[in-house]
Amino acid sequence: MNDSLPPDLDRLQTLEYWLRLQLRAVHTRIEEVKRYEASRPKPIPPPQPDWLLQPARAAGDGRPLYVHEGHCPAATGKAITRRQATEALTSGVEACPFCRPDTALGL
């Protein structure tokens, strides 16, 4: 038997009643929070960039690793313009082998 509970029926029933009240209060609060969250406007995610420049992996190497199209699942890095993507690819930065931004840019 649980030693932290009172041994007599009257106090056990009182405790049960109090716990039911608390549970009802929790359920009421859950419904209030659900209504509040449903009424709040949903945040709009920022637009996906068209091109990304992935930084080098080595800390001391400042040369970028890849240029990606914005939708590429392997893409990480900084958003860049179409012009910057073209300049990076023509200056020797590699095109991502998955999304092939060089093809999309006509290079």
Image (cartoon, rainbow, N blue to C red):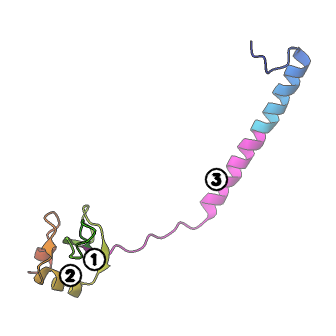
**Decide: marks 2, 1 in contact (CB < 8 A)?**
yes
Answer left or right for 85 relative to 45: left
**Decide: marks 1, 3 in contact (CB < 8 A)?**
no
The residue that disc 3 covers is 34
Q: Where 46 sits versus 30, above or below? A: below
Give the amino acid type for the residue marked by disc 1 in the picture. Asp
Q: Quick one: quadrant of the C terminus?
A: bottom left
The residue that disc 1 covers is 50
The residue that disc 2 covers is 85
**Camera-nearest residue between 64 and 5:** 64
Give the amino acid type for the residue marked by disc 2 in the picture. Ala
Which segment is the magenta one?
24-53
Nearest to the eye among marks 2 and 1: give it: 2
Q: Secondary structure at mark 1?
A: loop
Give the amino acid type for the residue marked by disc 3 in the picture. Lys
Q: Secondary structure at mark 2?
A: helix
